[in-house]
């Protein structure tokens, strides 16, 4: 079915320009236009849309207010701001309701790519209820002590951006959020950034403090006890998978950027589990119990209970947040790389291998599906012969214990 995309801008000439450059997409998309927030809501009330792309500064209802209303009324709609005006105050106001921020002037190819990535992701996660849950998320839970430490640091007289960045990089939820902000054009940075330390330095102390202390971009994990693996165990596993994935990519002579993406993809690969624990705790519990009772892998149990997996949920979230494609792909397919059409050695390859190998190196009885390499996939991308070498690299790579 054609996707319906609504553009909102008070300047008719801007809408006219968008219509002209995006006309070639009309076979794929149904484009509609509105010149005010109010008119946009009328359009949405008369017929549903999949994506809203709005200007920020408009008379009457501004873009931030419009997206907040859209978030409340139509939570599963993808919400994007396309604005030439970056008043920090308006940006802070819109962060909670905006998935991505594009800066004007923006070439049509970037607009097209951003929208098609966001709508394309919907096929990963076909369940509407889950899509709504994920689209509504603004933060992901963090380890309580790390969260408190970040707050304390910000109030201490000798706070440094490096220290803040290092604390953030020990936490899955905080890392994902900070990368969303730097990789989107929220603050006019729009670079490919995959390190929280670099992200903190780019944003600067004032912005970081406002984001954390007033805009509350981070939140504390509310489940003191969770069934199955603890959050600490998940963080340690994720950190180790990131380190191993990077080592694998380095051994395959990948560029520094690809190696860094691999680390970040490993760090974030199980982020969907956090989404489930915090937002659908009952189904999460059922999946944990089912996996234990029937000796299934966690993703097989999730598939039975939810009809999808934490991998798809995590990939969908990070895609909506505009994280680099290589990371989204690795997260979405880490348990089933064969589904992915990319035939290169990539972050996905490294995270898949590192995840299985990391579990195999523990002296524990994991279900078979959890500890099985996808040999067909490795064969198809021409990497099967490298597997023994990669296993060896994983065994010999020291994964520094994160202090949590
Ligand atoms: Fe996983
Ligand atoms: Fe994992």
Image (tube, helix red, strand yellow):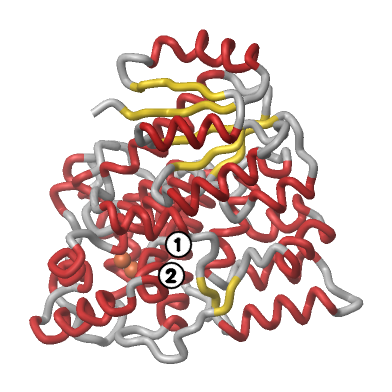
Closest to the observer: 400 or 342? Answer: 342
Q: Residue at x 58, y 84 (%)?
A: 144
Tell me if residue 323 can be seen.
Answer: no
Give residue 354's quadrant in the image: bottom left
Q: Residue at x 47, y 15 (%)?
A: 22
Q: Position of residue 311 (x, y in %)?
A: 31, 59
Closest to the observer: 369 or 131? Answer: 131
Residues packed near mark 2 inside 10 Å, few (<14), some (14 to 19) or many (20 plus) = many
Q: Residue at x 47, y 64 (%)?
A: 267
Give SS at disc 1. helix
Query: Where is ligand 2, by quadrant?
Result: bottom left
Give SS at disc 2. helix
Q: Residue at x 72, y 61 (%)?
A: 211
Q: Position of residue 49 (x, y in %)?
A: 38, 34
Tell me if residue 374 can be seen.
Answer: yes
Q: Position of residue 14 (x, y in %)?
A: 63, 16
What residue would you read off at disc 2?
238
Q: Position of residue 396 (x, y in %)?
A: 41, 71
């Amino acid at each position: 079915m054609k996707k319906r995309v609504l553009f909102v801008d008070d300047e008719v000439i801007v809408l006219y320009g968008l219509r002209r450059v995006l006309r070639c997409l009309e076979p794929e998309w149904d484009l509609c236009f509105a010149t005010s927030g109010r008119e946009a809501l009328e359009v949405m009330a008369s017929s549903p849309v999949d994506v809203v792309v709005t200007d920020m500064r408009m008379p009457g209802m501004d873009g931030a207010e419009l997206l907040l209303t859209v978030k409340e009324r139509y939570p599963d709609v993808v919400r994007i701001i396309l604005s030439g005006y970056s008043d920090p105050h308006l940006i802070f106001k819109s962060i909670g309701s905006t998935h991505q921020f594009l800066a004007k002037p923006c070439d049509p190819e970037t607009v097209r790519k951003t929208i098609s990535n966001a709508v394309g992701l919907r096929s990963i996660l076909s369940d509407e209820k889950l899509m709504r849950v994920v689209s509504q998320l603004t933060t992901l839970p963090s380890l309580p002590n790390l969260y408190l430490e970040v707050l304390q640091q910000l109030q201490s007289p000798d706070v440094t951006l490096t220290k803040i960045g290092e604390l953030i990089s020990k936490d899955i939820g905080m890392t994902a959020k900070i990368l969303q902000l730097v990789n989107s054009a929220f603050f006019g940075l729009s670079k490919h950034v995959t390190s929280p330390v670099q992200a903190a330095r780019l944003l600067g102390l004032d912005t970081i403090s406002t984001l954390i202390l007033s805009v509350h971009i981070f939140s504390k994990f509310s489940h003191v006890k969770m069934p199955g693996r603890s959050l600490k165990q998940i963080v340690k596993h994720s950190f180790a998978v990131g380190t191993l994935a990077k080592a694998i990519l380095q051994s395959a002579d990948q560029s520094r950027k690809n190696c860094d993406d691999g680390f970040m993809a490993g760090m974030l690969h199980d982020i969907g589990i956090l989404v489930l624990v915090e937002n659908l705790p009952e189904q999460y519990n059922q999946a944990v119990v089912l996996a234990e009772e029937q000796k299934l892998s966690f993703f097989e149990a999730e598939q039975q209970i939810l009809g999808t997996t934490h991998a798809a949920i995590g990939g969908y979230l990070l895609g909506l947040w505009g994280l680099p494609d290589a990371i989204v792909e690795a997260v979405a397919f880490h348990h089933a790389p064969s589904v992915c059409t990319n035939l290169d050695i990539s972050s996905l390859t490294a995270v898949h291998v590192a995840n299985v190998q990391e579990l195999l190196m523990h002296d524990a009885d994991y279900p078979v599906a959890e500890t099985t390499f996808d040999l067909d996939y490795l064969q198809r991308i021409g990497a099967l012969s490298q597997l023994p070498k990669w296993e060896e690299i994983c065994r010999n790579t020291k994964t520094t214990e994160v202090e949590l």
